[in-house]
Amino acid sequence: MEKMRLCDVPVGKTIYIDKILAKKSEKLRLLDFGMVKNATITPVFVSPSGDPVAYEIKNSIIALRNSLASGIIVKEEEG
Amino acid sequence: MNKRVQATKGKENGPVIALAGNPNAGKSTIFNFLTGLKQHTGNWTGKTVENAYGYYDFKGDKRVLVDLPGTYSLLPRSKDEEAARDFICFHHPDAIIVVVDATMLERHMNLALQIIEANPNTVICVNLIDEAKRKGILIDISKMRQVLGVPVVTTNAKNGEGIFDLLQEVENLIHRPNTTPLHIPQEEEIDVKVKSLTEKTNSRWTGLKLLENDKTTVEKICNLKEYNSVSEELLSEAEKAREELCEQGIDTDRLSEMISQAYYRFSSRMAAEVLEYTNPDYQQRDRKIDRLLTSKLTGIPLMLFFLGVILWLTIVGANYPSQVLSTILFGFERQIESALYLIHTPSFLVDVLVSGMYRTLAWVISVMLPPMAIFFPLFTLLEDIGYLPRIAFNLDKSFCRACAHGKQALTTCMGFGCNAVGVSGCNIIDSPRERLVAILTNSFIPCNGRFPTIILLVGILVNSLQIKMEATVSVLVVLLLIVLSVAMMLLASKLLSKTLLKGYPSHFLLELPPYRKPKIRSIIVRSVLDRTVYVLGRAVSVAAPAGIVIYLLANITLGGETLLGSIAIFLDPFARFFGLDGYILLAFLLGIPANEIVLPILIMGYTSLGSLTDIGGIETLRQIFIDNGWTFLTLLNVTLFMLMHFPCATTLLTIKKETKSVKWTLLAFVLPTLFGLGTCFITNSVYKLLIILQMM
């Protein structure tokens, strides 16, 4: 199954979270927002400079800097 | 302002009820509705900084309601969350209300589940139920009750719908506490380990925290009376369990992750059971607005446009009421004078009170009140709709480049209202380095105390150019100055990040809440009562004594020169260096209590009448300045120095309180001053150079 970084997902494409590669504190914060394994996430809009990007997760909108989104590994299918 | 509570000191006043929830779930709306305390609520993350508390009556019984800061989880990751966690877990409230947003139930249940696990004496308040209905989200409440084992109530706090039911459930809990905790299943391996710790501590939550070894929480658990004697034993057992888990391939990081995931597993399952979406596209409208407000093409221009409109309305709208107020207030002077003479007040004292205190007061009110009464409601409107987090989103890259935190954009916005508010708002930034950067640079942003003066100065500046469309040009100049102030703040942030506060920007995570219909009536009530009256009250309370002091300085003469004049003459050579003069510098120094009174002091000094005269209009002011040797450059430099100089006394005190350090407070004083003086020095030198070149 193909895996990629969240920051490389095009706007509007819904994708599944696989794992988070980040410092413990950041990882836990992302988990607080619902970025658990197999949760769906969709990039919805981009700031004027291209960074950060807003993502829809669990019906809420969370903005992430690309530096953080690059550590979130996503996949096309659940599992 | 609000009273603050450190612990459950309200116990003797009746049962204590904690109000918890995610940021922006409507907690503060419920708090305001119940207590009538005008605690401010904003449509953004992290507004409640300390635990504000108030009282409400239920069928004649007094209850204490503590408004906890909004948090995403019970694991403390910032000061706010630590405060909320401590209160829920260690201060034994008699009941807890957890407010969750009906439109994001699954996300918000993450916190609610952790709270129910820690203290089952909880009622879940599913708020914003009308918004959910509008968006086609149906919630099976009885099913929720069944799954959670705690009372669940739906509310629409804005109009008080469901609040009575909520309070009734709270009463039930006060009289018959719920002691059956919710069991959130963990992964098999963890469940086994936590079981024995749970039995020993009588709390699954405590057991989990011990196993997880979250430092600050464990410390506080061990300090609790009931665990004092057994804490050593508990800690070593937890340590042993951790080692065993590690052997099974679950290290401490993995352990925390698995525990966090368990809550989401539970809430996802619950969401699947209780939620039904009848309109899957309900977010389309919000996304369309978002794309408009944040796109490359329209994002920044729209932001400047809104700011421009607000400023234009403030400048144009404040003009007439200012003149009317000034006429009325100065008109009272005679009456007050004769009233004072009537009660045989010595004439010197009458002069001090009327020409010193009253005139300064009248000036401050007539110059400040109208722009504030226009600016604050408009600003609150943007805040209420949910636009401010989008500004932070748009500007984040610039903050990132300045090695600052993205949320600094939010504290910057607060700074436009009042720098002291902006500084205390820095609590929402969890990294200490970036928090300090935000605190130290907040006063680069012109606050409402400086806005009227800046607007006035720009008015004179533009007026002196004798051009058409004065108001529009003024707005553009003020807009330019605001952009300059933000740029300078970013430059200062970068400078700090490269020198005294070395470090990289931490990762940025910001929730962008749904757009909400503004509540016009409450905006007006809140912004006028809370902000306008508060800021004006502060200004008046410093302007009154300052008016007396300045009057005395301007009227006590030593060797043929007034004290004010002597000091100004002393400061003059230094001030000239920066294209200012002694009186200007002195006015700024004497204006430390409040920036609003800088101009009145200056005029008092110049007219050397020993007291303020009726301000009249821009023309009169301009004439006074020209008579005292002001050039276009002086006007420009005073404006720039108004934009960048030491913060006012209130802000300095707030910085001292927040940083707990004299050193940082001093730096907060020096930093913007150096920037201001530096800029004035440059404009002064360039101006002089141009003159020399012209003569050659």
Image (spheres, rainbow, N blue to C red):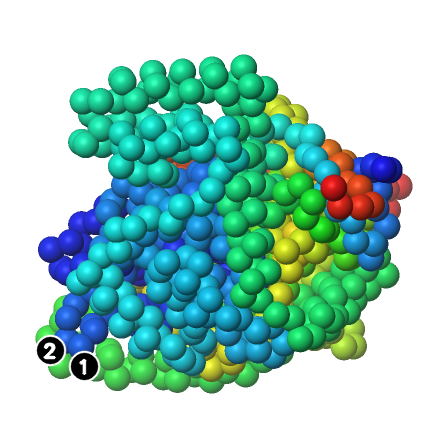
Picture layout, residue A6 above or below residue B116: above
Q: Which residue is mark 1?
A: B339
Name the spot of residue B387 as percent of width and height, x first: 63, 64
Query: What residue is drawn where x is 21% and y is 82%?
Result: B338
SS class, disc 1: helix
**Label 1: chain letter:** B
Disc 1 residue type (three-letter): Ala
Residue B301 versus residue A57: which sits nearer the camera?
A57
Expressed as whole percent of the image width and height from the top left, the position of residue B41 reads: 45, 64
Q: Let me know if marks 2 and 1 both belong to one chain.
A: yes
In the rendered picture of this protein, how many numbered marks are placed on residues? 2
Residues B210 and B614: in front is B210
* Residue at the image point whose x is 58% and y is 67% from the top: B275
Query: In the image shown, does B676 or B651 lie closer to the viewer?
Result: B651
Name which residue lies at 37% across and 28% down.
B210
Q: Quadrant of residue B277?
A: bottom right
**Drawn side of residue B139 relative to residue B541, left or right:** right
Disc 2: CA contacts within 10 A as few (<14), some (14-19) or many (>=20)? few
| Relative image position of residue B559 (x, y in whole percent) | 33, 45
Whether residue B75 appears in this view of the structure is: yes
* Residue B343, numbered circle: 2
